[in-house]
Structures are given as structure tokens and as C-alpha cells.
Amino acid sequence: MKVTVDTQGIDAQVAKIRGLADKKIQAAAAAALNDAARAGYEATKKEMSRVFDKPTSWVLGGVRYTKATSNSLESKIDFEQWGNKAGVTVAQVLRSEIAGGQRRHKRHEVALLRAGILPAGMFIVPGTAADIDANGNMRGSQIVQILAWFRSFGEQGYRANMSDQRRRKQGGDNKRTGQKGFQYFALQERQGRLLPGIYQRFSFGKMGSAVKPVMVFVRAPNYRSRFDFYGVAGKAAREQFDSSFETYLARMLSEREL
């Protein structure tokens, strides 16, 4: 969002009548705009911590603000535009939380859609066997492993896709670490108790096997707007600007004894 101002407001006109130069009034406006942008920035981060459950430092750090100058009486509060290593920006992640409605497919969902694993119109939520990090998100390493297993990487990442030999190796027990081998399989439709999704199958020899859900396929989730980015940032910025602009003008008038 943008915070803009002209110097025709009542406070500025009073200062001008009392003899304060236009250049000084513009400097006061620029300083107040910068205070306003900082206030909107802080209020936005505070609101994200309130409405989201354990937001990551990447999401919280994605808010940015740019300063005004005497020549450009405009400051901005926005999200950084460069994105993470995968090219995903914070704005993209929070779009449905801000505007509501249906969220967009994530990159791993798109990959599984293209591979024919995820049915059209379906989305993914973590299953009970998903490896969850401290922020409540499925770990990227497990997602990459699943994409590689189902050979879902595109042409650029084809080397990461698992060969049949690597699949067989993954399915065997690791005698050195004691880690149990497993296989992945996908269901596009419900089978008995098993919902559509991606599962891990662990074999225990004569004792049989166990199946655990890692990803569950669900219909398109619709989100209500939870994060009023524009409202929170705008309210904090406007209130701060009004206070700061008056203070800066009063200080300059006092210094000039006008």
C-alpha cells in the first residue's frame, strides 16, 4: 500500500502562513511519511504474529517499506518481491489469507498434478505420517523425496527423479542405522478406510506391513480473509502521519521562533 500526501493540508497552510518555507514543510511531510511507513510495517508484523499460528521468520521478514523524500512525498508498505530459492514470494503465500477465496496450487502440488498423481481439482494437506517442522509445515526434504519417488520433477530436475534401483534401495532396511525401509504409493480414489492421498508402506516380513498417510488429497479449500493487511497497515500509518507531521511542523516553527 502507498501513503501519499500533498502539502496543501490545514497544518501545512498554517505553517506557511506563519512563515515556514515550502522546502521545510516538504521535509516535515517526508519525515512524517517515513514514520507512518514504519508504523504500518510494525503493525503488519504484529498482526501476522497474532492471526497466524507460528508464522515463519521468512513470512514475518517479508514485509518491507520504502521511504519518502522531499521530492517524492510517497512512502510504501509492501512485501518483498524477490521470493525464496524456489521463486515463491511472501505475497503469493499470503494472497488467499489477505483476499480470501481459493488458494493457488503450491509448487509440489503442480508437479504432482503434471505427473498424474494428484487428481485435477484436488489439493494436498499433510497426513498423520508427514514430517512436520516447528512451524507446522511439512518438511521440504520429505516433499522432495516424494516428488523424486513419483518422478514428478520436470526436465530440468529429471536427475533427482528416482530410478527403479533407487526405489528398491529405499524400500530396504538400513542395517547400519536401523532405519526401516519403505515405499510410497498413491490413491486417486478412496479404498476402504484409505482416503485419496500418498502413503508410506512399511514391510515387517512375516509380521505383515503397515500403511501410513503422508499426504491427503482434498477438494479445493476456500479461505476467509484472516489478515487485513491494507486495513491494519493503513490505519497505523495514517494515525502516525497525523501525529508526526504536526510534531515536526511545531518543532520547525519553534526553532524559527515563528
Image (cartoon, helix red, strand yellow):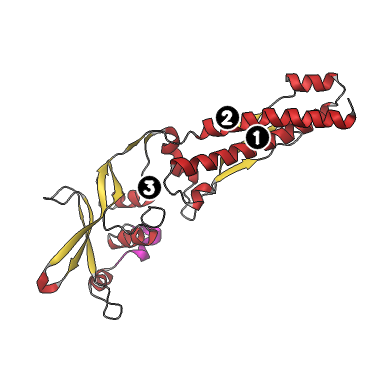
Q: Position of residue 179 (x, y in %)?
A: 27, 73
Q: Would residue 161 be counted in the magenta stretch?
A: yes
Quarter of the image with the N terminus in it: top right
Is residue 134 shown above or below 21?
below
**On the image, which quarter does residue 98 sit in?**
top left
Residue at image point 36% right, 65% down: 160
Disc 2 residue type? Lys
> Nearest the camera: 68 or 45?
45
Q: What's the CA distance linking mark 1 and mark 3?
A: 34 Å
Q: Secondary structure at mark 3?
A: loop
Q: Secondary structure at mark 1?
A: helix
Is residue 140 shown above or below 98?
below
Q: What's the CA distance linking mark 3 and mark 2?
A: 32 Å
Q: Position of residue 13 (x, y in %)?
A: 78, 19
Residue at image point 38% right, 50% down: 107
Q: Magenta part mainly helix, strand or loop? A: helix
Q: Position of residue 231 (x, y in %)?
A: 52, 30
- Magenta span of residues: 153-162
CB-based contact (under 8 Å), mark 3 and mark 2: no
Q: Secondary structure at mark 2?
A: helix
Q: Is residue 19 left or right of residue 65?
A: right
Residue at image point 53% right, 42% down: 46
Report the residue marked by disc 3.
106
Mark 1 neighbour density, 10 Å: few (under 14) some (14–19) many (20 or more): many
Report the residue marked by disc 2.
235
Q: Position of residue 86 (x, y in %)?
A: 46, 54
Report the residue marked by disc 1.
36
Quarter of the image with the C terminus in it: top right
Of tags 3 and 2, the one toward the viewer is: 2
Disc 1 residue type? Ala
Q: What's the CA distance linking mark 1 and mark 2?
A: 10 Å
